[in-house]
Amino acid sequence: MESKRLFGTNGIRGITNEELTPEFALKIAYATGSFFKRGNILVGYDGRTSSPMLANAVTAGLISTGCQVYNGGMAPTPAIQYAIKHHRMDGGVMITASHNPPQYNGIKVMAKDGVELPREKELKIEKIFFNNKFQLAEWNALGEIYSKLNVLETYIEAVKRHADIEAIREKGYKIVVDAGNGVGSLTLPRLLREIGCQVLTLNANVDGTFPGRPSEPRPENLQELASLVKTVKADLGIALDGDADRAIFTDEKGQIHWGDRSFALIAKHFLIENPKETVVTPVSSSQLIKDVVDEYKGKLVWTKVGSITVARTMLKMKAKLGGEENGGVFYAPHHPVRDSAMTAILILNIMVRTGKRLSELLRELPTYYIEKGKVECPHELKQKTLAELTAQVKNLKVDTIDGVKIWFEDKSAILIRPSGTEPLYRLYAEAKTKQRAKTLLKKYEKTVRTLINKLMDRSIGGKPKRFHHQS
Protein backbone atom coordinates (compact mmCIF):
# COMPACT_ATOMS: atom_id res chain seq x y z
CA MET A 1 0.00 0.00 0.00
CA GLU A 2 2.84 2.40 0.78
CA SER A 3 4.01 2.48 -2.82
CA LYS A 4 0.60 3.72 -3.97
CA ARG A 5 0.26 7.42 -4.77
CA LEU A 6 -2.64 9.40 -3.35
CA PHE A 7 -2.02 12.67 -5.16
CA GLY A 8 -2.46 12.61 -8.94
CA THR A 9 -1.92 15.34 -11.52
CA ASN A 10 -4.26 17.70 -9.68
CA GLY A 11 -4.74 16.54 -6.11
CA ILE A 12 -6.59 13.48 -4.87
CA ARG A 13 -9.68 12.33 -6.81
CA GLY A 14 -12.16 9.53 -6.31
CA ILE A 15 -15.81 8.51 -6.36
CA THR A 16 -17.75 9.75 -3.35
CA ASN A 17 -18.31 7.08 -0.67
CA GLU A 18 -16.26 4.57 -2.66
CA GLU A 19 -12.65 5.80 -2.75
CA LEU A 20 -13.45 9.18 -1.21
CA THR A 21 -15.27 8.49 2.06
CA PRO A 22 -15.52 10.78 5.10
CA GLU A 23 -13.15 8.38 6.89
CA PHE A 24 -10.58 8.74 4.13
CA ALA A 25 -10.94 12.55 4.13
CA LEU A 26 -10.52 12.57 7.91
CA LYS A 27 -7.31 10.52 7.67
CA ILE A 28 -5.94 12.74 4.88
CA ALA A 29 -6.68 15.73 7.14
CA TYR A 30 -4.80 14.05 10.02
CA ALA A 31 -1.80 13.72 7.68
CA THR A 32 -2.17 17.23 6.26
CA GLY A 33 -2.58 18.80 9.71
CA SER A 34 0.46 16.86 10.97
CA PHE A 35 2.44 18.19 8.00
CA PHE A 36 1.41 21.81 8.67
CA LYS A 37 2.25 21.52 12.40
CA ARG A 38 -0.69 23.36 13.99
CA GLY A 39 -0.80 26.02 11.29
CA ASN A 40 -3.60 28.33 10.18
CA ILE A 41 -5.43 26.51 7.36
CA LEU A 42 -8.14 27.85 5.04
CA VAL A 43 -10.72 25.26 3.94
CA GLY A 44 -13.01 25.82 0.95
CA TYR A 45 -15.25 23.67 -1.22
CA ASP A 46 -17.07 23.60 -4.55
CA GLY A 47 -20.76 22.96 -5.24
CA ARG A 48 -20.70 19.16 -5.49
CA THR A 49 -23.29 17.29 -3.44
CA SER A 50 -20.56 15.69 -1.31
CA SER A 51 -18.38 18.76 -0.82
CA PRO A 52 -19.87 20.04 2.49
CA MET A 53 -19.62 16.52 3.94
CA LEU A 54 -15.97 16.15 2.95
CA ALA A 55 -15.14 19.72 4.04
CA ASN A 56 -16.57 18.92 7.49
CA ALA A 57 -14.49 15.72 7.70
CA VAL A 58 -11.33 17.60 6.66
CA THR A 59 -12.07 20.39 9.16
CA ALA A 60 -12.47 17.85 11.98
CA GLY A 61 -9.19 16.15 11.07
CA LEU A 62 -7.28 19.44 10.93
CA ILE A 63 -8.68 20.58 14.29
CA SER A 64 -7.66 17.27 15.86
CA THR A 65 -4.02 18.00 14.95
CA GLY A 66 -4.16 21.43 16.55
CA CYS A 67 -4.57 23.42 13.32
CA GLN A 68 -6.68 26.60 13.34
CA VAL A 69 -9.26 26.23 10.57
CA TYR A 70 -10.65 29.23 8.71
CA ASN A 71 -13.91 28.50 6.90
CA GLY A 72 -13.65 29.80 3.33
CA GLY A 73 -17.10 28.45 2.40
CA MET A 74 -18.27 27.60 -1.10
CA ALA A 75 -16.04 29.33 -3.65
CA PRO A 76 -14.06 28.84 -6.87
CA THR A 77 -10.68 27.17 -6.41
CA PRO A 78 -8.76 30.32 -7.53
CA ALA A 79 -10.71 32.42 -4.99
CA ILE A 80 -9.66 30.09 -2.15
CA GLN A 81 -6.08 30.06 -3.47
CA TYR A 82 -5.95 33.85 -3.56
CA ALA A 83 -7.40 34.08 -0.03
CA ILE A 84 -4.72 31.73 1.35
CA LYS A 85 -2.01 34.12 0.18
CA HIS A 86 -3.95 37.33 0.90
CA HIS A 87 -4.80 36.35 4.49
CA ARG A 88 -1.30 34.96 5.13
CA MET A 89 -2.47 31.44 5.94
CA ASP A 90 0.04 28.63 6.43
CA GLY A 91 -1.82 26.53 3.87
CA GLY A 92 -5.20 25.52 2.55
CA VAL A 93 -7.41 22.65 1.50
CA MET A 94 -9.91 22.82 -1.36
CA ILE A 95 -12.59 20.16 -1.77
CA THR A 96 -13.18 19.82 -5.51
CA ALA A 97 -13.00 17.39 -8.39
CA SER A 98 -12.79 20.25 -10.89
CA HIS A 99 -14.25 19.06 -14.22
CA ASN A 100 -14.88 15.41 -13.26
CA PRO A 101 -18.42 13.90 -13.37
CA PRO A 102 -20.73 14.57 -10.39
CA GLN A 103 -20.08 11.30 -8.55
CA TYR A 104 -16.41 12.30 -8.12
CA ASN A 105 -14.85 14.60 -5.59
CA GLY A 106 -11.31 15.50 -4.63
CA ILE A 107 -8.94 17.14 -2.20
CA LYS A 108 -6.29 19.72 -3.13
CA VAL A 109 -3.70 20.89 -0.60
CA MET A 110 -2.18 24.35 -1.02
CA ALA A 111 1.00 25.89 0.39
CA LYS A 112 1.10 29.32 2.05
CA ASP A 113 1.55 30.99 -1.37
CA GLY A 114 -1.86 29.63 -2.43
CA VAL A 115 -0.33 27.31 -5.04
CA GLU A 116 -0.77 23.54 -4.75
CA LEU A 117 2.00 21.89 -2.74
CA PRO A 118 5.01 20.79 -4.79
CA ARG A 119 5.25 17.05 -5.44
CA GLU A 120 7.93 16.45 -2.81
CA LYS A 121 5.66 17.90 -0.09
CA GLU A 122 2.70 15.85 -1.30
CA LEU A 123 4.94 12.80 -0.83
CA LYS A 124 5.59 13.85 2.77
CA ILE A 125 1.84 13.94 3.45
CA GLU A 126 1.48 10.52 1.81
CA LYS A 127 4.26 9.11 3.98
CA ILE A 128 2.55 10.40 7.16
CA PHE A 129 -0.76 8.94 5.87
CA PHE A 130 0.54 5.45 5.05
CA ASN A 131 2.69 5.18 8.18
CA ASN A 132 -0.08 6.50 10.47
CA LYS A 133 2.39 9.00 11.96
CA PHE A 134 -0.28 11.50 12.92
CA GLN A 135 0.50 14.30 15.38
CA LEU A 136 -2.83 14.44 17.20
CA ALA A 137 -3.20 17.23 19.74
CA GLU A 138 -4.02 16.84 23.43
CA TRP A 139 -7.64 17.53 24.42
CA ASN A 140 -6.74 21.02 25.61
CA ALA A 141 -4.67 21.94 22.52
CA LEU A 142 -7.21 21.27 19.77
CA GLY A 143 -7.64 23.80 17.00
CA GLU A 144 -10.69 26.02 16.53
CA ILE A 145 -12.92 27.03 13.63
CA TYR A 146 -12.99 30.69 12.67
CA SER A 147 -15.86 32.37 10.89
CA LYS A 148 -16.04 32.70 7.14
CA LEU A 149 -13.76 35.27 5.53
CA ASN A 150 -14.94 37.56 2.73
CA VAL A 151 -13.34 35.24 0.19
CA LEU A 152 -15.53 36.08 -2.81
CA GLU A 153 -15.48 39.87 -2.36
CA THR A 154 -11.72 39.99 -1.79
CA TYR A 155 -11.11 37.83 -4.86
CA ILE A 156 -13.38 39.81 -7.18
CA GLU A 157 -11.77 43.11 -6.16
CA ALA A 158 -8.28 41.64 -6.71
CA VAL A 159 -9.13 40.47 -10.24
CA LYS A 160 -10.78 43.82 -11.08
CA ARG A 161 -7.48 45.59 -10.39
CA HIS A 162 -6.11 44.06 -13.61
CA ALA A 163 -9.05 45.13 -15.79
CA ASP A 164 -9.04 48.15 -18.08
CA ILE A 165 -12.36 49.07 -16.46
CA GLU A 166 -13.05 52.49 -18.01
CA ALA A 167 -12.47 51.27 -21.55
CA ILE A 168 -14.45 48.05 -20.98
CA ARG A 169 -17.32 50.00 -19.43
CA GLU A 170 -17.36 52.35 -22.42
CA LYS A 171 -17.64 49.38 -24.82
CA GLY A 172 -20.47 47.81 -22.80
CA TYR A 173 -19.73 44.30 -24.03
CA LYS A 174 -22.58 41.79 -24.04
CA ILE A 175 -21.32 38.48 -22.63
CA VAL A 176 -22.98 35.09 -22.10
CA VAL A 177 -21.53 33.12 -19.16
CA ASP A 178 -22.16 29.37 -19.04
CA ALA A 179 -21.15 28.55 -15.47
CA GLY A 180 -21.90 24.84 -15.90
CA ASN A 181 -23.80 24.79 -12.57
CA GLY A 182 -20.44 25.28 -10.85
CA VAL A 183 -19.13 27.77 -8.31
CA GLY A 184 -18.10 30.22 -11.01
CA SER A 185 -21.77 31.25 -10.82
CA LEU A 186 -20.85 33.08 -7.62
CA THR A 187 -18.11 35.24 -9.13
CA LEU A 188 -17.77 35.70 -12.89
CA PRO A 189 -21.24 37.11 -13.74
CA ARG A 190 -20.95 39.56 -10.82
CA LEU A 191 -17.38 40.57 -11.74
CA LEU A 192 -18.32 41.26 -15.37
CA ARG A 193 -21.39 43.30 -14.39
CA GLU A 194 -19.30 45.38 -11.97
CA ILE A 195 -16.93 46.39 -14.78
CA GLY A 196 -19.78 47.49 -17.05
CA CYS A 197 -20.61 44.41 -19.12
CA GLN A 198 -24.14 43.26 -19.93
CA VAL A 199 -24.24 39.64 -18.72
CA LEU A 200 -26.60 36.82 -19.61
CA THR A 201 -26.16 33.50 -17.84
CA LEU A 202 -26.63 29.82 -18.58
CA ASN A 203 -26.51 27.10 -15.93
CA ALA A 204 -25.67 29.73 -13.32
CA ASN A 205 -27.38 28.06 -10.36
CA VAL A 206 -24.92 26.01 -8.29
CA ASP A 207 -26.04 22.38 -8.53
CA GLY A 208 -23.70 19.48 -7.78
CA THR A 209 -25.56 17.13 -10.11
CA PHE A 210 -24.55 19.32 -13.11
CA PRO A 211 -28.01 19.16 -14.77
CA GLY A 212 -27.24 21.72 -17.50
CA ARG A 213 -24.24 20.07 -19.13
CA PRO A 214 -21.22 17.95 -18.12
CA SER A 215 -18.83 19.85 -15.88
CA GLU A 216 -15.97 19.81 -18.38
CA PRO A 217 -16.38 22.62 -20.93
CA ARG A 218 -15.74 20.76 -24.18
CA PRO A 219 -17.03 21.92 -27.59
CA GLU A 220 -19.61 19.11 -27.77
CA ASN A 221 -21.05 20.32 -24.43
CA LEU A 222 -21.26 23.99 -25.38
CA GLN A 223 -23.67 24.11 -28.31
CA GLU A 224 -26.34 25.84 -26.22
CA LEU A 225 -23.84 28.57 -25.29
CA ALA A 226 -22.75 29.00 -28.91
CA SER A 227 -26.37 29.23 -30.08
CA LEU A 228 -27.32 31.77 -27.41
CA VAL A 229 -24.30 33.97 -28.21
CA LYS A 230 -25.46 34.21 -31.83
CA THR A 231 -29.16 34.63 -30.94
CA VAL A 232 -28.64 37.57 -28.57
CA LYS A 233 -25.79 39.02 -30.69
CA ALA A 234 -23.33 38.83 -27.78
CA ASP A 235 -19.69 39.83 -28.13
CA LEU A 236 -18.47 36.55 -26.66
CA GLY A 237 -19.39 33.55 -24.54
CA ILE A 238 -17.41 32.12 -21.63
CA ALA A 239 -17.83 28.54 -20.35
CA LEU A 240 -16.45 27.44 -16.98
CA ASP A 241 -15.64 24.09 -15.41
CA GLY A 242 -16.96 22.96 -12.00
CA ASP A 243 -14.50 24.84 -9.79
CA ALA A 244 -14.05 27.82 -12.15
CA ASP A 245 -10.31 27.65 -12.69
CA ARG A 246 -10.70 27.12 -16.45
CA ALA A 247 -12.46 29.12 -19.17
CA ILE A 248 -13.34 28.19 -22.76
CA PHE A 249 -14.39 30.98 -25.12
CA THR A 250 -16.97 31.31 -27.88
CA ASP A 251 -16.56 34.20 -30.31
CA GLU A 252 -19.43 36.44 -31.45
CA LYS A 253 -20.11 34.10 -34.39
CA GLY A 254 -20.75 31.18 -32.07
CA GLN A 255 -17.44 29.48 -32.88
CA ILE A 256 -16.08 27.55 -29.87
CA HIS A 257 -12.30 27.73 -29.44
CA TRP A 258 -10.02 25.32 -27.61
CA GLY A 259 -7.98 26.69 -24.74
CA ASP A 260 -4.86 26.62 -26.91
CA ARG A 261 -6.21 29.43 -29.04
CA SER A 262 -7.35 31.72 -26.24
CA PHE A 263 -4.04 31.11 -24.45
CA ALA A 264 -2.07 31.80 -27.65
CA LEU A 265 -3.96 35.08 -28.07
CA ILE A 266 -3.13 36.08 -24.49
CA ALA A 267 0.53 35.03 -24.96
CA LYS A 268 0.82 37.07 -28.17
CA HIS A 269 -0.40 40.32 -26.60
CA PHE A 270 1.48 39.65 -23.37
CA LEU A 271 4.74 39.34 -25.35
CA ILE A 272 3.96 42.44 -27.42
CA GLU A 273 3.79 44.36 -24.12
CA ASN A 274 6.51 42.33 -22.34
CA PRO A 275 9.18 41.35 -24.90
CA LYS A 276 11.54 38.43 -24.15
CA GLU A 277 9.46 37.17 -21.20
CA THR A 278 9.10 33.46 -20.40
CA VAL A 279 5.89 31.57 -21.11
CA VAL A 280 5.31 28.19 -19.42
CA THR A 281 3.08 25.46 -20.84
CA PRO A 282 2.75 21.66 -20.61
CA VAL A 283 3.58 19.31 -23.46
CA SER A 284 -0.17 18.79 -24.02
CA SER A 285 -0.34 22.29 -25.52
CA SER A 286 -0.40 22.93 -29.24
CA GLN A 287 2.48 23.76 -31.53
CA LEU A 288 0.51 27.00 -31.94
CA ILE A 289 1.91 28.22 -28.60
CA LYS A 290 5.47 27.66 -29.80
CA ASP A 291 4.75 29.44 -33.09
CA VAL A 292 3.38 32.50 -31.26
CA VAL A 293 6.11 32.64 -28.60
CA ASP A 294 8.82 32.29 -31.26
CA GLU A 295 7.27 34.98 -33.48
CA TYR A 296 6.99 37.48 -30.62
CA LYS A 297 10.50 36.76 -29.29
CA GLY A 298 9.56 35.11 -26.02
CA LYS A 299 11.08 32.09 -24.32
CA LEU A 300 8.94 28.94 -24.15
CA VAL A 301 9.34 26.38 -21.36
CA TRP A 302 7.61 23.00 -21.76
CA THR A 303 6.61 21.08 -18.61
CA LYS A 304 4.89 17.90 -17.55
CA VAL A 305 1.08 18.03 -17.58
CA GLY A 306 -0.55 19.35 -14.42
CA SER A 307 -1.38 22.77 -13.05
CA ILE A 308 0.92 22.21 -10.06
CA THR A 309 3.90 21.72 -12.37
CA VAL A 310 3.08 24.77 -14.48
CA ALA A 311 2.57 27.00 -11.42
CA ARG A 312 5.68 25.79 -9.60
CA THR A 313 7.79 26.15 -12.77
CA MET A 314 6.52 29.72 -13.18
CA LEU A 315 7.50 30.56 -9.59
CA LYS A 316 10.94 28.98 -10.01
CA MET A 317 11.61 30.87 -13.27
CA LYS A 318 9.84 34.08 -12.19
CA ALA A 319 7.63 33.73 -15.27
CA LYS A 320 4.53 35.91 -15.44
CA LEU A 321 2.42 33.79 -17.81
CA GLY A 322 1.51 30.13 -18.13
CA GLY A 323 -1.29 28.22 -19.75
CA GLU A 324 -2.80 24.86 -20.66
CA GLU A 325 -4.77 23.57 -23.63
CA ASN A 326 -7.80 22.92 -21.40
CA GLY A 327 -8.53 26.62 -20.86
CA GLY A 328 -6.37 27.12 -17.77
CA VAL A 329 -4.38 30.39 -17.79
CA PHE A 330 -1.93 31.40 -15.03
CA TYR A 331 -1.25 35.14 -14.71
CA ALA A 332 1.36 35.77 -12.03
CA PRO A 333 0.84 39.56 -11.65
CA HIS A 334 -2.46 38.47 -10.04
CA HIS A 335 -1.64 34.92 -8.82
CA PRO A 336 0.24 32.09 -10.64
CA VAL A 337 -2.70 29.66 -10.62
CA ARG A 338 -5.38 28.71 -13.14
CA ASP A 339 -8.12 31.31 -12.94
CA SER A 340 -11.13 31.62 -15.25
CA ALA A 341 -12.11 35.12 -14.12
CA MET A 342 -8.59 36.46 -14.62
CA THR A 343 -8.52 34.79 -18.06
CA ALA A 344 -11.77 36.53 -18.99
CA ILE A 345 -10.31 39.90 -17.98
CA LEU A 346 -7.15 39.31 -20.06
CA ILE A 347 -9.27 38.53 -23.14
CA LEU A 348 -11.48 41.62 -22.59
CA ASN A 349 -8.40 43.82 -22.16
CA ILE A 350 -7.06 42.60 -25.52
CA MET A 351 -10.41 43.21 -27.23
CA VAL A 352 -10.76 46.72 -25.87
CA ARG A 353 -7.15 47.73 -26.54
CA THR A 354 -7.15 46.47 -30.13
CA GLY A 355 -10.73 47.47 -30.90
CA LYS A 356 -11.18 44.07 -32.59
CA ARG A 357 -13.79 41.37 -32.21
CA LEU A 358 -12.77 38.03 -30.75
CA SER A 359 -13.20 36.14 -34.05
CA GLU A 360 -10.91 38.64 -35.79
CA LEU A 361 -8.24 38.37 -33.10
CA LEU A 362 -8.26 34.58 -33.19
CA ARG A 363 -8.25 34.49 -36.99
CA GLU A 364 -4.87 36.25 -36.92
CA LEU A 365 -3.29 33.22 -35.22
CA PRO A 366 -1.87 30.18 -37.07
CA THR A 367 -4.43 27.39 -37.40
CA TYR A 368 -4.01 23.90 -36.00
CA TYR A 369 -6.71 21.29 -35.65
CA ILE A 370 -6.80 19.33 -32.42
CA GLU A 371 -8.47 16.00 -31.77
CA LYS A 372 -8.57 14.41 -28.31
CA GLY A 373 -9.20 10.83 -27.29
CA LYS A 374 -9.08 8.44 -24.35
CA VAL A 375 -8.21 4.76 -24.05
CA GLU A 376 -9.08 2.95 -20.83
CA CYS A 377 -6.10 1.48 -19.00
CA PRO A 378 -5.86 -0.02 -15.49
CA HIS A 379 -3.57 2.02 -13.22
CA GLU A 380 -1.22 -0.94 -12.74
CA LEU A 381 -0.56 -1.23 -16.50
CA LYS A 382 0.14 2.45 -17.20
CA GLN A 383 3.93 2.36 -16.79
CA LYS A 384 4.34 -0.95 -18.65
CA THR A 385 2.27 0.42 -21.52
CA LEU A 386 4.40 3.57 -21.57
CA ALA A 387 7.63 1.53 -21.69
CA GLU A 388 6.32 -0.60 -24.59
CA LEU A 389 5.10 2.47 -26.47
CA THR A 390 8.40 4.35 -25.98
CA ALA A 391 10.34 1.37 -27.36
CA GLN A 392 7.98 1.10 -30.34
CA VAL A 393 8.41 4.75 -31.44
CA LYS A 394 12.08 5.27 -30.55
CA ASN A 395 13.09 5.90 -34.19
CA LEU A 396 10.70 8.86 -34.52
CA LYS A 397 11.20 12.42 -33.21
CA VAL A 398 10.01 11.90 -29.65
CA ASP A 399 9.76 13.98 -26.46
CA THR A 400 9.33 12.12 -23.15
CA ILE A 401 8.83 15.02 -20.69
CA ASP A 402 5.43 13.51 -19.86
CA GLY A 403 4.27 10.36 -21.61
CA VAL A 404 5.32 10.29 -25.26
CA LYS A 405 4.94 13.20 -27.68
CA ILE A 406 5.74 12.38 -31.31
CA TRP A 407 6.54 15.23 -33.69
CA PHE A 408 6.19 14.81 -37.47
CA GLU A 409 7.74 16.71 -40.39
CA ASP A 410 4.42 18.25 -41.46
CA LYS A 411 4.13 20.08 -38.05
CA SER A 412 1.61 17.52 -36.82
CA ALA A 413 2.13 15.85 -33.45
CA ILE A 414 0.51 13.48 -30.99
CA LEU A 415 0.86 13.32 -27.22
CA ILE A 416 0.07 10.00 -25.51
CA ARG A 417 0.18 10.07 -21.71
CA PRO A 418 -1.32 8.21 -18.77
CA SER A 419 -3.88 10.23 -16.82
CA GLY A 420 -2.73 11.22 -13.36
CA THR A 421 -6.25 10.92 -11.92
CA GLU A 422 -8.21 8.35 -13.96
CA PRO A 423 -7.63 4.77 -15.25
CA LEU A 424 -6.96 5.78 -18.83
CA TYR A 425 -4.52 7.13 -21.40
CA ARG A 426 -5.18 10.57 -22.89
CA LEU A 427 -4.29 11.34 -26.52
CA TYR A 428 -3.94 14.81 -28.06
CA ALA A 429 -3.43 14.87 -31.83
CA GLU A 430 -2.89 18.06 -33.80
CA ALA A 431 -2.21 18.93 -37.41
CA LYS A 432 -2.67 21.59 -40.05
CA THR A 433 -5.78 19.76 -41.32
CA LYS A 434 -8.63 18.20 -39.36
CA GLN A 435 -8.36 14.96 -41.33
CA ARG A 436 -4.68 14.52 -40.52
CA ALA A 437 -5.38 15.08 -36.80
CA LYS A 438 -8.23 12.54 -36.87
CA THR A 439 -6.08 10.00 -38.71
CA LEU A 440 -3.25 10.39 -36.19
CA LEU A 441 -5.64 10.01 -33.27
CA LYS A 442 -7.28 6.90 -34.71
CA LYS A 443 -3.94 5.27 -35.49
CA TYR A 444 -2.44 5.79 -32.04
CA GLU A 445 -5.63 4.94 -30.16
CA LYS A 446 -5.44 1.58 -31.89
CA THR A 447 -1.72 1.25 -31.07
CA VAL A 448 -2.24 2.02 -27.37
CA ARG A 449 -5.30 -0.24 -27.09
CA THR A 450 -3.38 -3.11 -28.69
CA LEU A 451 -0.45 -2.68 -26.26
CA ILE A 452 -2.78 -2.60 -23.24
CA ASN A 453 -4.67 -5.71 -24.37
CA LYS A 454 -1.41 -7.61 -24.94
CA LEU A 455 -0.23 -6.70 -21.44
CA MET A 456 -3.57 -7.82 -20.02
CA ASP A 457 -3.27 -11.12 -21.89
CA ARG A 458 0.12 -11.65 -20.25
CA SER A 459 -0.94 -10.67 -16.75
CA ILE A 460 -4.35 -12.35 -16.50
CA GLY A 461 -4.93 -16.04 -17.18
CA GLY A 462 -7.71 -16.97 -19.57
CA LYS A 463 -9.60 -14.41 -21.59
CA PRO A 464 -9.14 -10.95 -20.07
CA LYS A 465 -11.60 -8.11 -20.02
CA ARG A 466 -10.52 -5.83 -22.82
CA PHE A 467 -10.58 -2.06 -22.64
CA HIS A 468 -12.09 -0.05 -25.46
CA HIS A 469 -12.11 3.54 -26.57
CA GLN A 470 -13.98 5.93 -24.28
CA SER A 471 -15.36 9.01 -25.95
Image (cartoon, grey):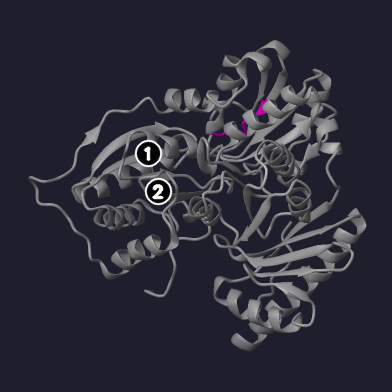
Which quadrant is home to the N terminus? bottom left
Under circle 2, the secondary element is: strand
User: Does the CB distance between marks 2 and 1 fall below 8 Å?
Assistant: yes
Residue 422 at what x, y percent from top left? 57, 61
Left or right of 200 on screen, residue 17: left
Q: Residue at x 79, y 82 (%)?
A: 395
When the figure is inspected, residue 174 is found, relative to residue 399, above or below; the finding is above
Residue 66 at what x, y percent from top left? 18, 47
When the figure is inspected, residue 199 is found, relative to residue 47, above or below; the finding is above
Q: Quadrant of residue 171?
A: top right
Q: Which residues are magenta?
A: 177-182
- Most common secondary structure along the magenta stretch: loop
Which quadrant is home to the C terminus? bottom right
Q: Which mark is residue 453?
A: none
Q: Residue at x 35, y 51 (%)?
A: 22
Q: Which mark is residue 84?
A: 1
Left or right of 259 on screen, residue 441: right
Q: Which mark is residue 110?
A: 2
Name the residue at the left extreme.
140
Under circle 1, the secondary element is: helix
Q: Residues within 10 Å of mark 1 (few under 14, many from 20)?
A: many
Looking at numbered disc 2 in the image, what kind of residue is underneath it? Met
Q: Does residue 247 appear in the picture of this structure? A: yes
